[in-house]
């Protein structure tokens, strides 16, 4: 009986310890936030700046890596989404930094960029640990963010280090500001005429290929045109012709 009491006490202490660790995780992502404010301007990234601050970047990534799956499960939904978005963006920066200089993320892998892109090599490369296992960027995007949450706006928050992507915001995503940040990310992306535009004279809607690649994510509750409408001043007609623009895979580097 005494032994059983010791076991229960041990389990209680361990449980409380894990709970405290989870609670003590910096959900403001302060280090990442400071790095973004310092090295990102109008969505363009100073990878040389991140290299100069590699100790801070690696320290932040280490914070993410130390979160166990059980700790993650104790997070609220907004805490989980913020955690995963920041992890995706920070590890993407790390991937570029580790291979710098590159002209495109698609240069990472084999010598042939088109093969890397077609096979998704940079995004399937296991180069970090998260929630207790070796992971790759596709795992964060497709197995966690897209699979676990009904939130299509994550596509405007995660950034694959390319000009064609939504811009990398100059602040970390946080649970407190998540709703506002996701909406800003969506509208900022939609209102960029180089990526999305509407010609009312020809009733033609020109959209980023992101809307083609992940169309099911955007159309679970409404049509694609209804989803993008709040990014345009002109009312888009329901029968508008949709043309998907070429995607620019050049590095989103601040020079």
Image (cartoon, rainbow, N blue to C red):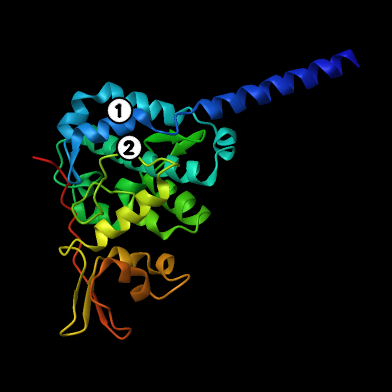
Mark positioned earlier in the residue sequence (1 or 2): 1
Quadrant of res 216: bottom left
* Direction from residue 204 to residue 64 in the image, left or right: right
Q: Which mark is residue 221?
A: none
Image coordinates for residue 35, horizontal then vertical, percent:
26, 31
Mark 1 residue crowding within 10 angstroms, few (<14) / some (14–19) / many (20+): many
The image shows residue 20 at horizontal and vertical percentages of 58, 24
Quadrant occupied by the C terminus: top left
Q: Secondary structure at mark 2?
A: helix
Residue 235's place in the image compared with 254, above or below, is below
Q: Is residue 122 above or below residue 226?
A: above
Q: Identify the residue at image location x=29%, y=48%.
A: 159
Picture residue at 49% right of the left edge, 45% below the top: 78
Q: Residue furthest right?
A: 1
Residue 136 in the figure: left or right of residue 8: left
Task: Tell me if mark 2 has few (under 14), some (14-19) or many (20+) residues whose alpha carbon lies within 10 angstroms of its own.
Answer: many
Name the secondary structure under disc 1: helix
Can you give x and y, in whole percent of width and height, for residue 92 in the image? 30, 41
Identity of the residue furthest to the top in this view: 2
Q: Quadrant of the N terminus?
A: top right
Query: Mark 1 and 2 residues: CB-CB less than 8 Å, in contact?
Result: yes
Quarter of the image for residue 118 reads bottom left
Task: Tell me how far mark 1 sits from mark 2, CA to CA.
Answer: 8 Å
Label 1: which residue? 57
Left or right: 205, with 128 as reference point? left
Percent of width and height locating residue 252: 17, 47
Mark carried by residue 90: 2
């Amino acid at each position: 009986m005494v032994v059983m009491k010791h076991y229960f006490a041990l389990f209680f202490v361990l449980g409380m310890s894990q709970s405290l660790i989870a609670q003590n995780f910096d959900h403001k992502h302060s280090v990442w936030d400071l790095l973004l404010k310092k090295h990102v301007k109008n969505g363009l990234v100073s990878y040389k700046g991140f290299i100069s601050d590699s100790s801070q970047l690696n320290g932040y990534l280490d914070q993410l890596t130390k979160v166990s799956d059980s700790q993650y499960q104790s997070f609220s939904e907004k805490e989980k989404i913020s955690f995963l978005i920041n992890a995706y963006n920070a590890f993407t920066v790390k991937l570029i930094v580790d291979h710098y200089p590159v002209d495109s993320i698609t240069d990472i892998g084999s010598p042939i960029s088109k093969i890397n892109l077609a096979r998704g090599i940079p995004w399937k490369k296991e180069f970090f640990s998260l929630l207790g296992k070796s992971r790759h960027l596709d795992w964060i995007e497709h197995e966690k963010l897209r699979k676990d949450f009904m939130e299509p706006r994550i596509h405007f928050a995660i950034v694959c280090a390319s000009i064609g992507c939504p811009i990398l915001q100059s602040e970390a995503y946080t649970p407190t500001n998540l709703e506002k940040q996701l909406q800003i990310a969506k509208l900022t992306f939609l209102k960029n005429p180089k990526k999305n535009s509407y010609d009312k004279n020809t009733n033609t809607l020109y959209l980023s290929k992101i809307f083609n690649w992940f169309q099911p994510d955007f159309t679970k509750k409404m049509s694609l045109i209804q989803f993008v409408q709040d990014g345009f001043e002109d009312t888009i007609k329901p029968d508008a012709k949709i043309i998907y623009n070429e995607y620019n895979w050049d590095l989103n580097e601040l020079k």
